[in-house]
Image (spheres, grey):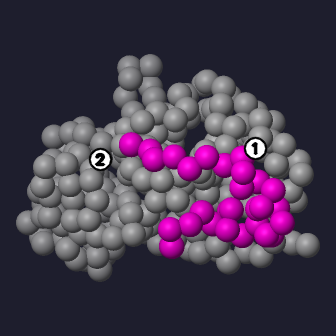
Amino acid sequence: MAAINFILDSLPEAEYEWLRPQLEEVELQQSTILCPVKEPIQEVYFPITCLLSWLNFTEMGEVVEAGVTGNEGVTGVTLLLNEPISPWQTEVQLPGVAFKLSAEAFMSALDRSVALRQRVAAFAYLKMVQLCQSAVCNRFHNVQERLCRWLLVAADHAGGAQFALTQDILAQMIGAGRPTVSLTTGTLQSADLIRTNRGGITILNRAGLEATSCECYQILQQALNHYLSQKIKS
């Protein structure tokens, strides 16, 4: 996808021009928490070049990723349901640029713009598909399959084969221990599928990585392509 935000880019020109002055372009740094879990949503973010994760926690502090938002979507989708409390933590996983909008302005825009409401509703459904598939993946697929899936998703949103990700972050994303992730990345590197260095990963063989991943990646790609092909109803 190009360096735009799909939701904003698909709005009618008059509606976007009304909304544009309220959008603030911001540079987001890796590991920045945009909204803690079970806290009121203060702002929403329309990613352009960054990748954001939805994280959830156990009482013991263990972390697992439930979903991601890239430049196809927006954070704070529960505001569409008039629910201001976030059920997950939103955190920056790949740094980059986004547009920020206050939650109040976002809700006003949803009331004013039918096109925006349609796009956000379609994106919310896409996230439901993602959440359901993540549950299946985390239950039935092994660490190597899950890691390959996540690396492919990260590469898609990074717009290239190289991106900055530590093994600690990868362990959190797929709900595995760091030693296990270290062993698995070593296996993928020995197979010449990826190359790792301090804080970074390069995909060397994308086709091989897709073949090693579970079916969840293709299922989620099909859902994403369907979402991107939907037209706004007049």
Q: Position of residue 87 (x, y in %)?
A: 61, 32
203 relative position to 68: left or right: left
Q: Position of residue 146 (x, y in %)?
A: 35, 56
Say what amino acid the circle numbered 2 marks.
Leu
Residue at 87% across, 72% down = 233
Say what amino acid the circle numbered 1 marks.
Phe
Residue at 61% across, 57% down = 73
Disc 1: which residue: 106
Disc 2: which residue: 170
Q: Determine the residue located farthest toward the front in the rendered image.
A: 21
Q: Which quarter of the rendered picture does the C terminus lie within?
A: bottom right
Q: Determine the residue located farthest toward the left in the rendered image.
A: 190
Q: Is residue 164 visible?
A: yes
Residues in magenta, as a range: 1-29
Numbered disc total: 2
Instruction: Give the mark nearest the N terminus, 1 or 2.
Output: 1
Q: How much space separates mark 1 and mark 2, taking CA atoms? A: 32 Å
Q: Is residue 116 above or below residue 219?
A: above
Q: Which mark is residue 64?
A: none
228 relative position to 31: left or right: right
Q: Is residue 193 above or below residue 81?
A: below
160 relative position to 56: left or right: left
Query: Alpha-carbon neighbours of circle 1 within 10 Å: few (<14), some, or many (≥20)?
Result: many
Q: Position of residue 168 (x, y in %)?
A: 25, 40
Mark 1 falls on what kind of element? helix
Residue at 89% across, 51% down = 112
Query: Alpha-carbon neighbours of circle 2 within 10 Å: few (<14), some, or many (≥20)?
Result: many
84 relative position to 35: left or right: right
Q: Position of residue 109 (x, y in %)?
A: 82, 48
